[in-house]
Image (cartoon, rainbow, N blue to C red):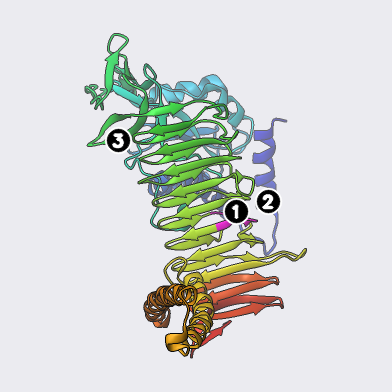
Amino acid sequence: MSIFDYFASKAADEQDRKSASPSPNKKLLSELDAAGEEVKAQYPNDSKLMDDFVKILKKAYKLRSKKAPDGTLPPTQAEAHFFLSNDRMRAYACLLPPENGGEGISLEEFLESMHYEGICYGILQEEIRQELGRGYFRIFPVARGEFPKAGEDGKVTELFQRRKNMHLEVQDESQVDFSQDVQLQPIRKGAVICLIRPSRAGADGMDVTGKTLPCPPGISVHIPQGENTAITRGGQALTASADGILYIEDDQFCIHAQKIIDGDLDQFQGMLQISGNLYIGGNVDGEVDIEASGDIVINGKVGQARVRSLNGTIRVQQGVYGTEGKTFISAARQVQSPVLEGAEVHAGISVITEVISNSTIYCHGIVYAMTGRGMITSSLIQAETSILCRRIGNLAGGRSRFSVGYPLHSAESWKRVKSELAEVEPTIKKLWAAITDLKKKGNRISDTEKSVLDQLMEQRNLYIERRDALTAEMKSLNKVLDKRTNGKIQCGQLFPVLEVQIGRLSEEITEAHENCNIHVGDNQIIFR
């Protein structure tokens, strides 16, 4: 007995049973509902059509169940029913089982029925063969049309990213992701920027009924050719006509002619001076001295070296691992590096990093270490705005000194002036005492003593001038340091020892703290 006959026999046996379970017809019709839901989940765009198809199948099945005039149920062969999607790109089928000893349906008969229904293209013959062996009341796709293949438009394949801004500087320090490549794109003369493909004719499609679906024509292509680029290779490539930095402007690739050093730089004698931007593909070491008027990108590491950007930003992709007194980084705008170790760093706007260790940092803006480890340890940092990090210090101890909220070196200058005033005033008093003793001699003073008196008077006048200058400088510094500041030091975890100076106020922190917001309030340093 075939699986189809078994299925029909089982349905007949169910009709003979007298129980509270649903009638056989209702059970089989519910199978149609389930089959419809399964196909709708797979082809949601045909959901409405599938509901209509299920209704048609139910109606057809009920008509097959009508008795003959003599009250008998005649044999009924298995039937294949078909349905098309609205766009005629998919055809579905469902098999209704034979009844009362009727015959099943063969593959050849099934395909013949499809043919007479006008389904003649994209026949899924292998899938149909498998479905015929899986039983009845299943809805399955039997044909799939082919959409027209548009004539290929002329195409430009861009081999470089469209980066509009050639500058490294970022407005939001959190945007710097040291795991990603730098934004500047160095390029060599002759390198291919874009591949160009002319337009090509397409191919018509066809729905499952054999109707041709015309393809749209291809269109020409815009070639983004800008400054210092050329169309070569018989019109099939846009290439660089100069070494430099590639960028996009007005929807065109342009090249800013630029100095590029592909590998390491560690043997250069003297100072390497560049007008404009500089890109170094490797490491910088060997006490080399580099100066550029624009941005400097170092794709490797920096060791013992002096690197200065007179008007731009310095980005060290793999970190600065320097030696005290032999590693110097200075940028008019930003310094960006995942690690700053053993270096002296000067930045005009901000320092953006993940780790600062055993370094000296001078910054006219913010020192930011909030990504990665976000750690600052054993370092001297002066920042005119703030210092933001995740962690200060480590378990091994160490000492850091932070100064925030005021112009660079103003607190140091105040201490220096105060110390010098403390030395000048007693010296003036000592000189005055010696001068007074000599003046008391009156006419009895010798020529030698008179010469000494003149020298003492001259020294006293010089010290008085120095005192007056220091007093004026102190007054100016006091005005600066007395101004209210929003400078702050924020960190999630703090390990001692940390010396904090904000203006003339200072504090030595010798205990561990968490979630610190160190700032000035009520003329004192506050930790929260």
Out of 255 and 403, give the one closest to the viewer.
403
Front tag of 3 and 1: 3
Residue drawn at (52%, 67%), measured in percent from left and top?
A: 387
- In the rendered image, residue 425, in percent from the top left (x then y), is placed at 49, 82
Out of 401 and 439, give the one closest to the viewer.
439
Ranked by sequence position, the earlier of labels 2 and 3 is: 2
List the residue tagged with mark 2: 14
Give the structural element (helix, strand or loop) at label 3.
Answer: strand
Neighbourhood count class around disc 2 (C-alpha, 10 Å): few under 14, some 14–19, many 20 upward: some
Count of all numbered marks drawn on residues in the image: 3
- In the rendered image, residue 454, in percent from the top left (x then y), is placed at 42, 75
Question: What number is the disc on residue 178?
Answer: none
Question: What number is the disc on residue 248?
Answer: 3
Q: Which residue range is magenta in the image?
A: 353-360
Question: What number is the disc on residue 27?
Answer: 1
Q: CA distance from mark 1 to mark 2?
A: 10 Å
In this rendering, position of residue 56 left or right of residue 433: left
Front tag of 1 and 2: 1
